[in-house]
């Protein structure tokens, strides 16, 4: 892709996100979401492969439907209350439609079918944008309207997302699809707590973005798209494979690593809200996700392929992304000890 075109699309992505997260009026928030959708479409379809074109088409249709529902819900609310302010969403039908619209945009169960397919048709860097940056505007809209959302509906969708995100990721061999189901599972954790403690959802999203970026960039560095490719990656970059193991276990939420922090705080908050059964169900369902993270980690570092390739080990490479990978992986492994400071800031 032309560097100038790539720059324009990247600036448009930034602009759309900024407009949505800083707006008070529903029409401005909707405009930001539309700019975001139109900016990411050329990045998805840039390879001109039929699968990429199919992914871009699916993404456009799903996002257009969700944006129309956002507009419909805000217009219904304005019709009944005379308010276009995002924080003044009070009409029950509008709240229900908005929750559905944002769930479609995020890919929460039962509106998750598009997300793995779109991610599979995109490159790893575009997949990273779809899993992180494109989720930020809808999450902020949920954050701003959290006081008027339906807790029962959100809890049902959250538990289903964690269950299906773990269950459907078990049988996958494509790395991008595994990361898509991982994203669905993490979004379940974020959406269950947004009604009770919205700031905790944002903290979870920031840490999820950090860990996902580390994993996607590591996969991109080793050009890994399938588990079979991952098995031979250690012969080229053994140090990166070792770090990837820890980043994946952090994404799974194992205790000494950064990923344990949001899960710990969410379980604690759910227990405070007398929702111990929901916390227990979520904890048990996260074991499903743990299995496919362990499988990825196992393929990355522990398996020995039948035919080892005689590559020169790339201990020192001059790629500019290497420093970024080092910073992100370090952060996604070591932030748990400073959790009191993180919770104080958030």
Image: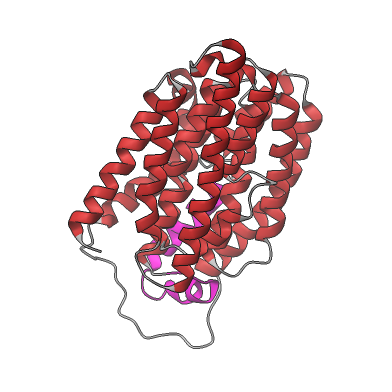
Q: Residue at x 45, y 85 (%)?
A: 308
Q: Position of residue 269 (x, y in %)?
A: 66, 23
Most common secondary structure along the magenta stretch: helix
Q: Is residue 234 magenta?
A: yes
Q: Is residue 239 magenta?
A: yes
Question: Foreground residue, 49 or 229?
Answer: 49
Task: Using the image, determine if residue 343 lies above or below residue 138.
Answer: above
From where the camera sits, is residue 328 visible?
A: yes
Image position of 9 (left or right of 230): left
Q: Residue furthest left?
A: 4
Q: Residue at x 37, y 71 (%)?
A: 48
Q: Position of residue 264 (x, y in %)?
A: 62, 32
Q: Residue furthest right?
A: 277
Image position of 211 (left or right of 295): left
Task: Using the image, determine if residue 13 lies above or below residue 153.
Answer: below
Q: Residue at x 28, y 49 (%)?
A: 9
Question: Foreground residue, 307 or 104?
Answer: 104
Where is the N terminus found, in terms of image quarters? bottom left
Question: Foreground residue, 293 or 121?
Answer: 121
Residue stretch in magenta: 224-251
């Amino acid at each position: 892709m032309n560097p100038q075109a790539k720059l324009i699309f990247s600036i448009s992505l930034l602009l759309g996100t900024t407009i949505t997260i800083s707006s008070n009026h529903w029409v401005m928030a909707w405009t930001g979401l539309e700019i975001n959708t139109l900016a990411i479409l050329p990045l998805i379809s840039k390879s001109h492969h039929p699968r990429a074109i199919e992914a871009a088409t699916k993404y456009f249709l799903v996002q257009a439907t969700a944006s129309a529902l956002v507009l419909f819900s805000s217009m219904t609310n304005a019709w009944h209350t005379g308010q276009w302010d995002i924080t003044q969403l009070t009409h029950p039908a509008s709240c229900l439609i908005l929750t559905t619209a944002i769930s479609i945009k995020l890919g929460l169960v039962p509106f998750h079918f598009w997300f793995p397919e779109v991610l599979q048709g995109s490159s790893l860097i575009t997949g990273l944008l779809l899993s992180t940056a494109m989720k930020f505007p809808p999450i902020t809209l949920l954050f701003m309207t959290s006081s008027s959302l339906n807790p029962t509906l959100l809890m049902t969708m959250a538990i289903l997302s964690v269950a299906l995100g773990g269950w459907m990721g078990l049988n996958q061999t494509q790395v991008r699809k595994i990361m898509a189901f991982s994203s669905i599972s993490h979004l379940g954790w974020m959406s269950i707590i947004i009604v009770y403690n919205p700031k905790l959802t944002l903290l979870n999203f920031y840490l999820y973005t950090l860990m996902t970026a580390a994993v996607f960039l590591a996969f991109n560095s080793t050009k890994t798209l399938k588990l079979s490719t991952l098995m031979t990656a250690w012969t080229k970059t053994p140090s990166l494979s070792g770090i990837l193991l820890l980043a994946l276990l952090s994404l799974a939420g194992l205790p000494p690593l950064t990923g344990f922090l949001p899960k710990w705080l969410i379980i604690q908050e759910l227990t405070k809200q007398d929702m111990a059964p929901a916390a227990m169900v979520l904890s048990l369902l996260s074991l499903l996700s743990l299995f496919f993270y362990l499988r990825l980690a196992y393929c990355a570092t522990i398996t020995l392929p039948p035919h080892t390739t005689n590559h020169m080990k790339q201990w020192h490479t001059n790629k500019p992304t290497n420093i970024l990978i080092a910073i992100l992986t370090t952060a996604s492994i070591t932030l748990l000890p400073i959790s009191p400071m993180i919770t104080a800031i958030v």
